[in-house]
């Protein structure tokens, strides 16, 4: 029997939980232990009720960053806006994730939009996978592309912002005795399995030649549509 830890850090609503439910139930059916460190525990029972999943609260930041990018244009700017460049806060967050790892002692960790959890897992010997859309599981690239080119932010500025965040992350890794990252995308490129639960056509970064797309699954079921009698395709 393996112990599988689900680590959900960022995002909201039932979208994350509903995508985690089918694999969690299948792992449990096969006799594994499943522990879920969740950002939002308030709705866990709407999805996992009766499954046997064990719950933990994932580390949360409750303060806004002092210097956010008002309209973030890249994945690193988003990471900055959620606090990954704040060294004192990140020391506490990383320490909390490491305590979870030491307590749960997982054989496999599945990260769902969990960059801090991935950073804290550097150097650990458990299998590491990430699940989510292309937005949540970005490619290992440098520099990251500009999602909002109409803002006309100079590429040199975006790259400077990315390098500044990389320096902060590498300081945290150095304090933990871990080797530095060459680029932020390496956090995801070094994972054992990036599980893109989307389709190539819907990838935020465009189709990736070497990627494996798993498609979309979820446990939520809506009502059967009652189509009106009309001409044209059903959309």
Image (cartoon, rainbow, N blue to C red):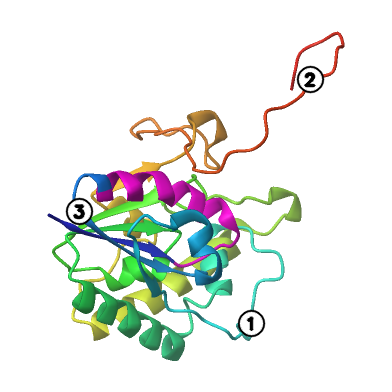
Q: Say above or below: 6 vs 91.
A: above
Q: Is residue 104 visible?
A: yes
Q: Residue at x 19, y 78 (%)?
A: 102
Q: Element at badge 1?
A: loop
- Whether tag 2 and tag 1 are in contact, CB under 8 A, the answer is no
The spot of residue 6 in percent (x, y) is: 34, 60
Q: Which residue is mark 3?
A: 32
Say which label, 2 or 1, has the lower sequence index.
1
**Closer to the camera in the image, 190 or 120:** 120
Q: Say above or below: 155 vs 117.
A: above
Q: Element at badge 3?
A: loop
Is most of the magenta stretch helix, strand or loop? helix
Mark-to-mark CA distance, 3 and 2: 42 Å
Q: Which residue is mark 1?
A: 67
Q: Is residue 149 left or right of residue 229?
A: left
Over which residues does the magenta segment extend?
9-28
Q: Is residue 141 visible?
A: no
The residue carrying pointer 3 sits among few (fewer than 14), some (14 to 19) or many (20 or more) residues within 10 Å by Cα, namely some
**Closer to the camera in the image, 117 or 208:** 117
Mark-to-mark CA distance, 2 and 1: 49 Å
User: Which quadrant holds residue 50?
Assistant: bottom left
Say which label, 1 or 3, has the lower sequence index.
3
């Amino acid at each position: 029997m393996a112990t599988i830890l689900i680590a959900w850090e960022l995002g909201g609503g039932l979208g994350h939980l509903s995508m985690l439910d089918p694999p969690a139930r299948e792992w449990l059916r096969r006799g594994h232990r499943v522990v879920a460190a969740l950002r939002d525990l308030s709705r866990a029972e709407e999805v996992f009720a009766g499954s046997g999943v064990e719950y933990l609260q994932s580390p949360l930041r409750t303060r806004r960053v002092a210097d956010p990018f008002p309209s973030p244009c890249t994945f690193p700017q988003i990471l900055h806006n959620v606090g990954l460049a704040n060294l004192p806060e990140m020391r506490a967050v990383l320490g909390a994730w490491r305590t979870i790892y030491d307590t749960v002692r997982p054989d496999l960790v599945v990260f769902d939009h969990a960059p801090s959890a991935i950073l804290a897992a550097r150097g650990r010997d458990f299998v590491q996978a990430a699940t989510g859309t292309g937005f949540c599981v970005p490619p290992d690239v440098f520099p990251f592309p500009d999602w909002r080119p109409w803002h006309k932010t100079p590429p040199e500025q975006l790259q400077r912002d990315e390098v500044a965040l990389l320096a902060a992350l590498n300081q945290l890794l150095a304090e933990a005795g871990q080797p530095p990252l060459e680029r932020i995308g390496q956090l995801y490129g070094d994972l054992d399995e990036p599980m893109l639960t989307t389709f190539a056509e819907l990838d935020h970064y465009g189709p990736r030649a070497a990627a494996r797309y798993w498609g979309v699954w979820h446990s939520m079921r809506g009502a059967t549509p009652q189509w009106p009698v009309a001409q044209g395709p059903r959309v």
